[in-house]
Image (cartoon, grey):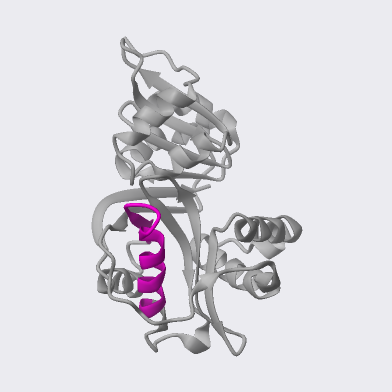
Amino acid sequence: MRSRVIEPTTEQILRFCAAAPVERVFLEDVARRRQGRFAALADKEGELTALCHLGSNLVPSGVGCDAFASLAAKSGARMLIGEAGAVTELWEAARKKLPRPRLDRPGQPVYAISEPPPAGDTGIRPASPADLDVLVPACAAAHLEEIAVDPLRRDPSGFRWRTRSQIDEGRSWLWIESGVIRFKAEVSAWTSEAVQLQQVWTDLPARGQGYAGRALRDLIRLLLERTPTVCLFVRAENAVAIGLYESVGMKHVLDYRSVLL
């Protein structure tokens, strides 16, 4: 008999996320910030066995995620993303009711690090509102490179607002000299157990000179002062980025899958 889909409490979500803090860092972050809707399956004791965030992205986790197929079909989501097994289970159950995917990226490695790497001696710092005009085009270029969508064509004012919000929330970091971004990154999720980075980026003129590795080491060192683990995920075919992450001591710990609709 199939378990009934429920709307979980925040306490249930947090207990579920605590069992896999790196994999579920995004789910915990949005639950704590009361963002979006959740659906879940629970056992007889009320402990969750599967969870799905329902927003512009569908983010499933756990076992039995095919139970969320009907909700996924009605969601209007632009992407399914999360632990590879959970995404595959949901996608196979819901694919006939969803648009044909623009991109399907299985086996996206998730990297994590819990020990501070050697210092890089860079100028990495939190971004400030004065950096907004420099960061918006860089963030847009990183977004285009990552998911093949130009946010400045789709929603320029909304994207500028979101970039400013990341700055205001202390989730944006950069190293800039002579108007060139040697390194920048944002925090997409932040909990007491893990920080997830996204949109790691270096301007084209500054690439291939070792800046990214040095700055990433310094950023990891700063973040590990506040949380036990820094993590991120990357496209499986992005050998340059994978080489960068492994060079600073990050380890491949699990796999995500993303299906872009």
* Residue 211 included in the magenta stretch of the image: no
Choose top left, top right, bottom left or bottom right for residue 244.
bottom left
Q: Quadrant of the N terminus?
A: top left
**Residue 80 point in image, percent of width and height:** 46, 43
Residue 54 in sight from this viewpoint: yes
**Residue 2 point in image, percent of width and height:** 34, 13
* Number of marks drawn: 0
Q: Is residue 208 above or below residue 216?
A: below
Instruction: Answer left or right for 156 relative to 252.
Output: right
Residue 89 in sight from this viewpoint: no
Residue positioned 60% across, 90% down in the render: 178
**Residue 74 point in image, percent of width and height:** 58, 29
**Residue 170 point in image, percent of width and height:** 57, 58
Residue positioned 73% across, 61% down in the render: 156
The front one of 101 and 31 is 31
* Residue 230 included in the magenta stretch of the image: yes
Instruction: Answer left or right for 162 relative to 208.
Output: right
Which segment is the magenta one? Answer: 213-234
Choose top left, top right, bottom left or bottom right for residue 168.
bottom right
Q: Residue furthest right?
A: 157
Instruction: Answer left or right for 128 relative to 258.
Output: right
Q: Residue furthest front?
A: 225
Residue positioned 59% across, 73% down in the render: 138
Q: Is residue 157 above or below residue 3?
A: below
The front one of 120 and 41 is 120
Residue positioned 24% across, 58% down in the render: 252
